[in-house]
Image (cartoon, rainbow, N blue to C red):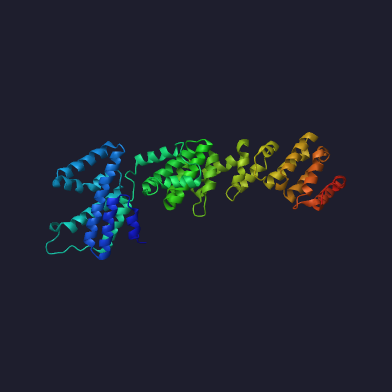
Amino acid sequence: MLADLDELVMKCRDERAKKYIDEAVRCYRSGAYRAAVVATWIAVCFDIVDKLRELAGAGDLQADAKAKEVAKHVASNDIAASLKFEAGIPELALEFEFVSNTEKIDLERLKVDRNRCAHPTQNNDAEVFEVPSELARLHIRNAVCHLLQHEPAQGKAVLERLWNDIESASFPLTSEKVLDRLNAGPLRRARQALIRNFIQIAIKKVFVEKPEYKQRNKLNLVLLASRTMHPDEWERSVKEQFGKISERAVDDAALIAFVRAFDKPNLVLWDFLTPVQQERLKNFILHAPSEVFDQLTLLEDKLFEDVVNKRYAKATRAEIMNGGFFMLPSILQVRLAEYLEYSPSFAEANKIFQYINTNASDFTPDSVGKMVHFASKNRQAYDASGFSSLIQKLATIPEIGKEFLDKKLRENGLAAIAEATGLDIPF
């Protein structure tokens, strides 16, 4: 798809370069293709000089020396020195990481074509050098996309600047503000190499450096924002790097969270893990420590559902009752009910009944039916005071109701409790 010329003009950072690119576009549209190529080259030269001055102002001594050299040539009207400097523009752009090696080749081609357009002595005197419209348009597009739209630095310096900002105390902690912050910096119009390096560093920081929770959350927001800004390059970078970096991951919980958070239909991160890595993560879930047990609810999807359910099947009573669940999974409801069958005392049974009472709205009819079944097998459960109170509470829940409870109590030989509590159940 051809780049829109007006959009290319608007992408230019430098005002002087923008004016010359605008002139190049107007020449192109009027059919003056040689003039378009010359104006494009002038825009490139001005952009390089202004980038050097910008870096010099930021304290780059090498850029400062080059900027002063240009100023000296202009002040002394040294045409030969100025032409020599101009001839070295592509090499200079590469030296200061304004362009990549491949992009430098395109600048070289622009310089050659500019010379053929502006210097008749370089052409055969029997021929007129004709510039195809496609070539003129290509030079305009390459000049903007390779150089004019970008920050004056695209290598280590800008990466360091980005991460200093992210790690500062003033960096925001909400997704919308993180996106605004990154859009206001050099990542917005970054070249592919910078985006790729930035994402690689972010993933390493999450998995290899094992940051504390707050920092990890910030890094995840940064990764989400960078995906929104550059979705195509983000996916390419993650596909290339995720599997390799995850080999060095020191935090399995963070790795699992990342796989789940960023897995999308068109980018299944799980598929980029080796079978050994996949087995490692499943084993971590299967033997997840108690301190992360309640976080397993975040993994109840197609990738981890089977292994999560296996871990739930081994859950202790304390893990279930001490977990901060937003909604208690049905498999854990049944698992907790199983402990009623072996409760050693009324007090222990009442603790379970009290927990169920507090979370009664989470419980499904099937779970409640199993709870009655297991309680009926242990006198320490069905004779506990908390059981009758729980029955009364469950009867008020529309999805369960008195009739369902009455039926389950009678099926499990607890008709006396059904009768004893029936008059106290509100209608």
Left/right placement of residue 418 relative to residue 291 reads right
Question: Could you say which is closer to the camera, residue 4 or residue 197?
Answer: 4
Toward which corner of the image does residue 359 lie, by quadrant? top right
Q: Quadrant of the N terminus?
A: bottom left
Name the quadrant containing residue 334: top right
Residue 273 visible, this orientation: no
* Near-viewer residue (355 or 58): 58
Q: Where does the image place residue 97, in percent across and percent down from the top left? A: 30, 44
Q: How far across and how far down the image is residue 207, in percent?
A: 49, 39
Residue 7 visible somewhere in the drawing = yes
Residue 25 drawn above or below residue 211: below
Horizontal side of 93 relative to 380 (left or right) equals left
Report the residue at 39% width, 43% height from top: 197
In this view of the protein, which residue sits in the foreground, 386 or 56? 56
**Residue 258 locus on image (x, y percent):** 52, 44
Question: Where residue 294 sits in the image (x, y, percent)?
Answer: 63, 40
- Reply above or below: 30 against 162: below
Lateral position of residue 379 relative to residue 53, left or right: right
Residue at the spot x=26%, y=60% of the render? 136
Q: Residue at x 55, y 42 (%)?
A: 281
Q: Is 200 on the left-hand or right-hand side of 124? A: right
